[in-house]
Image (cartoon, helix red, strand yellow):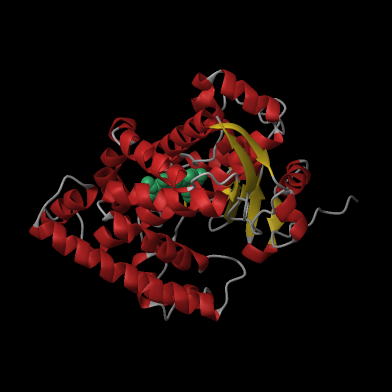
Amino acid sequence: MQALPKLDPQSEGFARDPHHTYTQLRNLPDPYYYEDVDSWMLTKAADVEAVALNKTMLRNVDHLLSAAERKDAQRKLNWHDMPHHERFVQTNLLESEGDTHARLRKLVFREFTAAMIARQRDTIQAFVDHLLDGLGDRDAFDFVEDFAAHVPGHIIGRVIGVPDEDCPRLRVWSEQVVRFFDVGRNDDDKQLAERATKEFYEYLLTLVAARRAAPQEDLMTRMVGHQDAGLMSEDELIATTMLILMAGHGSTIDVLGSGMHALLRFPDQHQRLRDDPKLINLAVQEMFRFESPLPYFHRFATEDTEVAGRMFKAGTRFGLLYGAANRDPARFENPDQFDVSRSPNRHIAFGGGTHFCLGNHLARLDMDVIFTTLNQRFASIELAHEPAYKPGLSVRGPIALNIAVKRH
Ligand code: HEM
């Protein structure tokens, strides 16, 4: 019998090339059972999509548990003494289901439609120009730390109504709050996550008070209006705002880094984009497919269900490997080829079904403006050396990306 491939997300080899492992898993006759997270890992696009779209598959089955069972489960996850993290991070739009999810999602959905987000184009352009001007005449820099890392906090902050000078703090809080979810987390991470959530909460409370006193044309003001109209509680307001500020933070930085890396690894594709800038929308979609920045989510079956041709019991947990599905040769021709004109491109980097990414238009607009501007400003961009990627199953992006540029 053929030995099962080993899934070791913290290994150097996996960080270097997760797609080799994904291919091995995809070639197995059945989904791979990953004991560490008690999950059946799905890697085929059709299976991942079927589960994401299945309304009986939930991210969270807490409502099926008694209070005691829930506490016990939280204790096992080492969460029980993290009051702020538990209150605002472990229970938000993404973690809610059913009526609560539908109510909260409806309130924020209208803020993130393509038309609403298109209004941010000038803000994004101005900020990107400002960042690039700030690089002066430097001809070598770390694209991740010196550029990409500054973008999402500022832009999402603007949408919400966070004053520009406070945006750098959002990045620090976001990173500290989400670090708790890393597989390799320790007690220090836990303390940091709790402290950061508390500070973040207190900061947002001040912003809520400021908007209530003096309404502005921003999302926070409209959220305060929803709370005052009895459509959401204050805790829901804070948790949703925090989620919006965090969900697109690291992921945008990561896909900017991996997208740039893809252009530099495939210079002929970069040249095609330079020659035909109208390809930008397709090129950006391809960046999300090629290295999906959030490659792994999960769902629980709430009833006995057939998945990938096998029956599974209610309560089974599935790993949705969006990053693997996006390289499935059954859906994508030459999946390991980065192709800036790939069309159709039915990637699943933003998930599917009820939790489909709220911020997808914003993430794509950031990328559109950034790569268009970079190609206009720089006559050439080259890789100084091959980057190392972050370890882990849940995130994908280069730690640093050192590039050398020549200006026009
Ligand atoms: C940059 C790349 C991004 C990627 C790859 C991404 C990916 C995803 C995915 C896969 C999900 C679904 C999770 C699941 O299936 O369980 C999701 C949900 C979500 N995303 Fe994004 N996202 C990105 C950017 C953003 C941005 C910029 C924002 C904020 C404006 C955002 C806000 C959200 C929210 C609020 C949810 C939860 C939606 C719900 O539960 O109804 N995302 N995202």
Number of callouts in the render?
A: 0
96 or 68: nearer the viewer? 96
Q: Quadrant of residue 212?
A: bottom left
The image shows residue 359, relative to residue 231, as above or below, that is above
The image shows residue 279, relative to residue 292, as above or below, that is above
263 or 56: nearer the viewer? 263
- Residue drawn at (64%, 57%), measured in percent from left and top? 390
Q: Is residue 38 left or right of residue 214?
A: right
Residue 109 x/y as whole percent: 30, 41
Q: Quadrant of residue 126?
A: top left
Is residue 307 visible to the viewer in this orientation of the structure? no
- Residue drawn at (39%, 53%), measured in percent from left and top? 153
Q: Residue furthest right?
A: 1
Q: Residue furthest front?
A: 137
Q: Is residue 136 left or right of residue 332?
A: left
Q: Residue furthest left?
A: 213
Residue 364 x/y as whole percent: 45, 36
Is residue 42 visible to the viewer in this orientation of the structure? yes
Residue 172 x/y as whole percent: 43, 65
331 or 362: nearer the viewer? 362
Q: Is residue 269 left or right of residue 245?
A: right
Residue 186 x/y as whole percent: 57, 77
- Residue drawn at (78%, 45%), measured in percent from left and top? 24
Q: Quadrant of the C terminus?
A: top right
